[in-house]
Amino acid sequence: MSKTVILIPSRLSAKRLPGKPLLKINGISIISHVVKKAKEADIGDVYVATEDKEIIDDVNLNGGKAILTSKKHKTGSDRIFECFEKLDLIDINYIINLQGDEPNIDLNDLKHLYKLININKPEIGTIAAEIENKSILNDENVVKVITENKITNENFPIALDFKRRANDQIINIYHHIGIYAFKPEILKKIINLKQTKNEIKNRLEQLRAMENRIKINVALAKFSPIGIDTMEDYLALKKLLEYNS
């Protein structure tokens, strides 16, 4: 199997909900919940990449590992690449970038992506789920991905585009889940490319890769995790997870 490391970018200065990594659910911070899930997947070592000492302290307190990175990064990809270089790991085949604000990520979906990258050896792999509620097509907070073929549990089609808004006439459109598996050399290439106009306009850094002819393969996810962008998101997820615990 490919030697893989999971890196989780996290910072306190999120524009819409400052401080969200340290908001607590069942007495544990959101970021430490994500670390716990990543470790349970048993794919590889797990590290948080952050510019904030408070996050490092929290992650360490809860049994995780964290690396201090620069405050100047424009994207999570930049942050995890600095972390990767600082770790100076040997013979890593893939870096998985796991979002730090999705504590209810499904472990089976993460393992499914890991299985497919080992079989197919893509430049970049990611995951997406079926769209059950068409109202999300116009929700800019939910990123959509269009693939060349219908995604099944067995295949791993190429992404054709990513959108924040879309219509229901588009075929093979899915709810994109922001988890990426990069070959280290591809991540290095991406962070050394200039941000594109389309990337900046849409606030989607994966468009930089696509516009530079880097292919992104998409695996099927069975579950759409709830990302935390607002206080309402946090309170809804807190209620759900604490009820189910």
Image: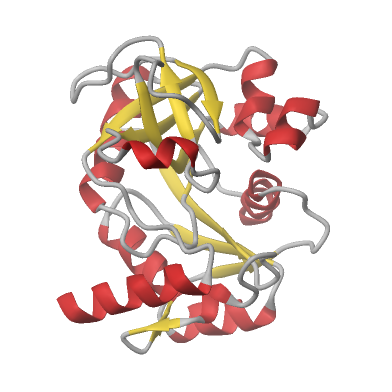
Question: Number of numbered discs present?
Answer: 0
As displayed, is residue 40 above or below residue 218? below
Please state which of residues 37 and 157 is positioned toward the viewer in this rendering.
157
Q: Position of residue 139 (x, y in %)?
A: 49, 44
Quarter of the view holding residue 214: top right
In the current view of this chain or complex, which residue is farthest to the bottom?
Answer: 27
Q: Quadrant of residue 207?
A: top right
The percent coordinates of residue 236 (x first, y second) are 35, 72
Q: Residue at x 66, y 66 (%)?
A: 14
Left or right of 67? Residue 107 is: left
In percent of the image, x 30 and y 47: which residue is there? Answer: 224
Residue located 34% across and 69% down the image: 36
Residue in front for this viewpoint, 16 or 189: 16
Chosen colour scheme: secondary structure
- Residue 191 makes an appearance in the image: no
- The reply to whether residue 11 is visible in this rendering is yes
Q: Is residue 20 left or right of residue 98?
A: right
Quarter of the N terminus within the rendering: top left
Is 17 positioned to the left or the right of 15 in the image? Answer: left
Q: Write the residue at 37% across / 35% down.
A: 127
The front one of 92 and 142 is: 142
Residue nearest the viewer, comparing 100 with 118: 100
**Residue 183 in the image, given as x and y percentages of width and height:** 53, 30
Residue 135 spot, x, y in % from top left: 38, 41
Up the image or down, 35 lies above or below 188; here it is below
Q: Which image quadrant: the C terminus?
A: bottom left
Where 202 falls versus 20 (above or below)? above
